[in-house]
Amino acid sequence: MQPYLFPYLGYFQLLHAVDTLVLYDDVTYINRGWINRNRLLVNGAPWLFTLPLANASQNVLIKNLRLADWLAAWRQKWLKTLAHAYAKATYFGETQALIEPLLHQSSPWLIDWLEDSLRTLAAALGLSAHFKRSSADPLPPATDAQARILQRCAREGAGLYINPINGRALYQATAFAEQGIALRFLRSQAPAYRQSHAPFVPHLSIVDTLMFAGLAGTRALLPQYELVTDELA
């Protein structure tokens, strides 16, 4: 998976399901993706925020993306928005104490910032998946996305590859079976948790989940998924 900024609950359910997460940092950046963007709940509606980058371009590999020089000003404004949006949330204090230090990563490189936040949040949620960067163990060029995944699975000695449910359009179980690898897709079954406004707004950042469900409540949501085949997805 690409490293995402404070990703939604389903990303952490994927971490719950796997032994190893390979962070794809040697692929090109995707504009308007989730690498440096996500959504919070502000005044009952999704609010999109973007971590500022110095060299955001679809020609740049994720591992080569640098944070903008004005990150400190962005951080101050983001924390003010967070306090405004969630000050009355049940677990505001607990979540703020977990999230705020992650905004002070000293490295200028986005991948360091993202991996540190993912590792920290995973540990806080009791997840033990092993993290590694694809750039640390590069592979030869592949013909397409599926071939690249198969190469990586072979390199890792994987017997099972799990992808989020939306990946069912990209990968075919027969191609994986030919390599002795099972293919499954993760479909979340986590129920709606109580937010500050109704109706429930799904697929927001894990920050929203933590604010309203807390660490204990979020841990309880993590196993609520099913692994399906492409035929059943």
Image (cartoon, rainbow, N blue to C red):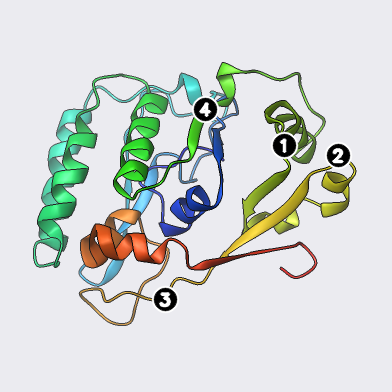
Taking the image as drawn, is residue 32 in sight?
A: yes
Mark 3 vs 4, N-terminal side: 4
Q: Are marks 3 and 4 in contact (CB under 8 Å)?
A: no
Q: Are marks 1 and 3 in contact (CB under 8 Å)?
A: no
Estimate the spatial distance between the alpha carbons at disc 4 and disc 1, rounded to whole Å: 15 Å
Q: Which residue is mark 1?
A: 149
Q: Where residue 225 sits in the image (x, y, percent)?
A: 53, 66
Question: Up-down: is 171 above or below 130?
Answer: below
Q: Where residue 178 sits in the image (x, y, percent)?
A: 90, 43
Dot 4, crowdedness within 10 Å: few (<14), some or many (≥20)? some
Q: Quadrant of residue 113?
A: top left
Report the label total: 4
Of the residues shown, which amino acid type is indicated by label 1? Ile
Q: Which residue is mark 3?
A: 191
Q: Which residue is mark 2?
A: 179
Estimate the spatial distance between the alpha carbons at disc 3 and disc 2, rounded to whole Å: 36 Å
Residue at position x 74%, y 62% from top? 229
Q: Where residue 19 sits in the image (x, y, percent)?
A: 55, 41
Of the residues shown, which amino acid type is indicated by label 2? Gln
Q: Where residue 77 sits in the image (x, y, percent)?
A: 14, 43
Residue at position x 38%, y 39% from top? 118
Dot 2, crowdedness within 10 Å: few (<14), some or many (≥20)? few
The image quadrant where one finds the C terminus is: bottom right
Of the residues shown, which amino acid type is indicated by label 4? Lys
Estimate the spatial distance between the alpha carbons at disc 4 and disc 2, rounded to whole Å: 22 Å
Mark 4 vs 2, N-terminal side: 4
